[in-house]
Image: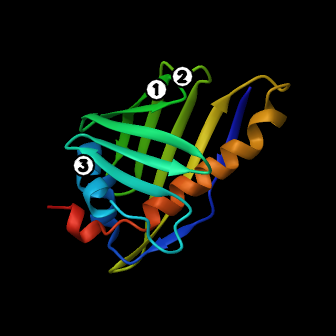
Amino acid sequence: MAVKFESNVKYVSYSQEQVYNVLADLSKIRKVAKAFDVQRPGMDFKMTFVDEDTMEIEAKGNTVTIHVVSPDALELSAKGMTVTLRVVEREELKLVKLSADNSPVPFTMWIQILPVEAYQAKLKVTISVEVSMFMKPMISKPCKEGVEMFANLLSIFQYNTLCD
């Protein structure tokens, strides 16, 4: 059974093209880690630059390590488990779709990007998780919180500095 979780819509003060160009190329995550190697006020997580290809995000007592594999793949490691996120679809300027490899719970993630004005876009993150109906109550809260936190993270990127 596929269960979907959607973030709230987030507004960013960058063009749809700037946002898409960063999110469609996962290797640009390298620049993000350097830019956020501090705890900023209002952030409910801490991002730390580890090395050229790796960063850590700490939130709610959990740490996730993100390792850039290529422009199309990231490895996420937490609690002794590693999952690879791969770009499986790109719709120019509008959508980046990722799928999880080696995940105990299969899931797909969509990042939708829409223009608002010339230098403002909105984005929404959706995940679809394959679980039994008995598992749904156990994963609903963590999935909803996770998708919202990820959308919040994407909404604070400085896309104009990451496009280069």
Pointer 1 local density, CA inside 10 Å: few below 14, some 14–19, many at least 20:
some
Pointer 2 local density, CA inside 10 Å: few below 14, some 14–19, many at least 20:
few
Q: Amino acid at mark 2?
A: Ser
**Earlier along the polypeptide chain: callout 2 or callout 1?**
1
Report the side of 129 relative to 47 (left or right): right
Q: Amino acid at mark 3?
A: Arg
Per the rendering, the mark at residue 103 is 2
Instruction: Give the quarter of the figure containing the C terminus.
Output: bottom left
Report how far apart the C-alphas of labels 2 and 1 lie in the structure. 5 Å
Q: Position of residue 145 (x, y in %)?
A: 67, 51
Tell me whether circle 1 and circle 3 mark residues in contact (CB < 8 Å): no
Report how far apart the C-alphas of labels 1 and 3 lie in the structure. 18 Å
Instruction: Give the quarter of the figure containing the N terminus.
Output: top right
Q: Amino acid at mark 1?
A: Val
Q: Position of residue 44 (x, y in %)?
A: 56, 62
**Earlier along the polypeptide chain: callout 1 or callout 3?**
3
* Whether residue 124 is situated above or below residue 52 in the rendered picture: below
**Earlier along the polypeptide chain: callout 3 or callout 2?**
3
* Whether residue 33 is situated above or below residue 9 in the rendered picture: above
Mark 3 lies on residue: 30
Report the side of 25 relative to 41 (left or right): left
Q: Quadrant of residue 67?
A: top left
Per the rendering, the mark at residue 83 is 1
Tell me whether circle 2 and circle 1 mark residues in contact (CB < 8 Å): yes
Q: Quadrant of residue 128?
A: top right
Mark 1 residue element: strand
